[in-house]
Image (spheres, rainbow, N blue to C red):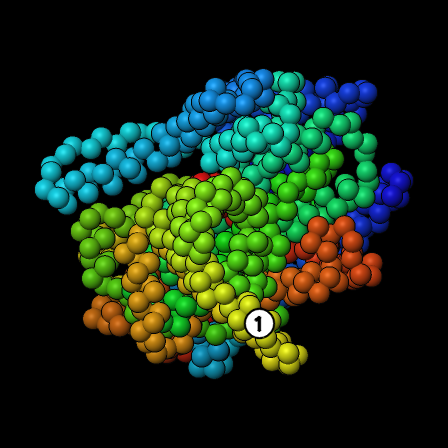
Amino acid sequence: MTAKRFFNGIFLFLILLVVLDRISGAVLEYGIYKHFDLHSNVDYLVLGSSPATLDLSKALLEKRTGKKFAFYTQLGVTTEDRLIMLKHFLSINKSKLKGVIYELTPHIFTCKGLSENSNQLLFPYMNDKVIRDYLKIKCQSKLEYYERVIFSTSRFNEMTLNFAVRGIINDRTNLKFGIVDTIGLQKEIKANNFWKITMDTDCINTFRNTVYFLKQRQLNGTFVFFPVVHILTTAEPEKIKSVEQRVQEIVKINSGNQLLNYTILFKDSTNLFFDHLHLNVDGQKEFTLIFSKYFIQVKSSFNQK
Amino acid sequence: MLFTSVNYFIFLLLIVVAYWLIPGRTPFYRNLFLLIANYFYYTWWDWRFSFLLLVLSGIAFGSAILISKSPEGNRRKYLLIISLILIFSSLFFFKYYNFFIESLGIALAGIGFSTQTRILGIILPLGVSFYTFQLSGYILDIYWEKREAERNPVTFFAFSSFFPLILSGPVERSTNLLKQMNTVARINWDDIAAGLKMILWGLFKKLVIADNLSAYINQVYQGPSGYNSVTLFFTAMLFMVQLYADFSGYSDIAIGSAKLLGFDLIKNFNLPFFAKSFADFWRKWHISLTTWLFEYIFNPLNFTLRKSKKAGIVISLFTTFFISGLWHGAAWTFIIWGLLHGTMLSVEVILNLKKRVWEKVTSKILKDFISIASTAFIFITVSLISVFFKANSAGDAFYIIGKIFSFSSGSVYIGSSSVTFFLNILVVLFLLLIEILQYRKIASLNFSETRLPIWIRWPGYASLIICIFLFGKTTAGFIYFQF
């Protein structure tokens, strides 16, 4: 092989690679938008992280309420990511949205921990300007950012690929059949080895900005504290109280907002939890029924506004 | 600078371009450049490690010259013994000292002596197991007059620290690599293309297959008591695939990188999952180490014990595989792993199934059936033995094996996501498909020749890159780095 033939081959191969990458990236992007219903005209947006994904059944909720919901919920996203996700959603869904259901847990103001690098989950949407601008600031290196600009498939990781595939095959199966290990959890709490609640100022400010942003866009929010296994609530009761109080103060900014607290809803039913922060399949069904019952009662007030 | 990092590929690109731009009628300047690049690469990890490499290379270089100058007799033998002791004592100190001291303490406590063992806080220099074997192999080659001692220190030190090999092999022979370093190579674009393809295939195996399987496997091995027989059995099979994808992936990147510089390295894997016997498996698995062990341990020992016939072979096999186990790690799990392989090979030698059964079968259908059945049997047995390779302790390994054979009911655990599980199975099947193509000689092992048309190959290569983009986000180290 001559040098000329070698470099011609490399050049042609790169063109083929870019074409295939763009096609694959577009298919996956379609899948992830479909999974989160980002392009559909929905009535309500559920915004949050894994508790909202696992604790509420989209199908059951829609069936019981007769309304369409988009679940833009990704594991470990921070308040900052959520605000960007909200802006992203509104940039593509301008008209029909009636309200936002915002997931809360006692860790809502804990920026450090699970949520580090959560912005990685937003790479698949970087064709959208809102997301692109945000990621440009958040990326650890320019290399990380531009690699994803050039190769669209590199925007996906194991989790977002999972979402995209689920979107393409239309699969929302919940396989969380297990039951939380309360003895193990108790031991961890005793050993002081558990995810501590903190009140990070940045997170609080971003949450406040989110509430202001919703008000500005004339959208009402239903702020929901999702169920947490009771043992965990006994570990740091004072901190939980502080978080709840702070949320209450901020939510009040808009009188149309509602705050629901289901933290200790399943206080005596640990068998409904998959782990300390997430419900299992049975828990999901039960919680969705309770939540939709409430929702049917108050939807008229939503509609009026 | 992991082989899977962007930094490594920037480094490799710069080295390859600069290397081929160096003119000269002798390889001196290229080797000098390579030597600097090698030490730059090695000190990138930890500058302290390079002193040991430098000293041991110096010992091998000097002693080889002295051995080659010495006439036949005791002086030559003593020189060999002293140099080997010096080289292996460093390996013993860094890798095995704590293990032996601990084991000795436990053994003494078992017979009633109370001792206070002192564990040293030493870190294992990267690649020490590989380069000590490479250097000792070189000295033995000189002693057995397989080659002349290298007189040029630049060439020798470039050989002993060659960056694609230094961390995890393949364990190269001086008769192969050093010989190539003494010639002026011309750039060969076919080799460059083949090298790039090998690197790509290696990256795919490591990042897409091995690293994605590791999450599932680690989860099961962290708490084996929570899983049923089927899951533990399935995980043992998956671990064998992970180990293969991880290490052969590393080897492919190493061999591909060397190919870009014009060097042909020893092949390290040759479709081991198609092995039809344990002997066949070891001819296909970690070839560079196995051939080293057979060349420098098994053969001399077997020759010494030749009068004992089969008993001699069995003793030699056990000794060789005991050393192989110990080489892999200073832990009882690895020793048991090595001895189990030694046992399987010994059983094969004693039963001599090849002559007794295989050669007597004339029916093609029966031959095909035996061939498939023995391939499956070898894969399953090797996977079950590999439980000792992976388990946290010998106790855990025995527990897992025991539970697998308890045949407890239940279905396979599919992990936290069915989609991820399905994708993992898909990539394993893809690996199998490629290996079948290689086994059937439709695709070649080093990707240099293939019967596949370009409209399949090129989209295939592009798909591999896309899969790496999609799955290759982990930064997990290579399994063989710990050795």
- Quarter containing the C terminus of chain B: top left
* Residue found 82% across the figure and 40% down from its top: B189
**Subunit of label 1:** B
Rendering coords of residue B203 (x, y %): 62, 48
Rendering coords of residue B15 (x, y %): 69, 29
* Residue found 48% across the figure and 19% down from its top: B75
Camera-nearest residue between A73 and B370: B370
* Residue B26 appears left or right of B298: right
* Residue found 79% across the figure and 48% down from its top: A14
Camera-nearest residue between B103 and B217: B103
SS for callout 1? helix
Rendering coords of residue B13 (x, y %): 70, 33
**Res A159 visible:** no
Camera-nearest residue between A217 and B20: B20
Q: Amino acid at mark 1?
A: Trp
* Residue found 31% across the figure and 29% down from its top: B121
Rendering coords of residue A123 (x, y %): 59, 51
Q: Local crowd at mark 1 within 10 Å, few (<14), some, or many (≥20)?
A: some
* Residue A226 appears left or right of B116: right
Residue position marked by numbered label 1 in the rendering: B358
Which quadrant of the view contains residue B161?
top right
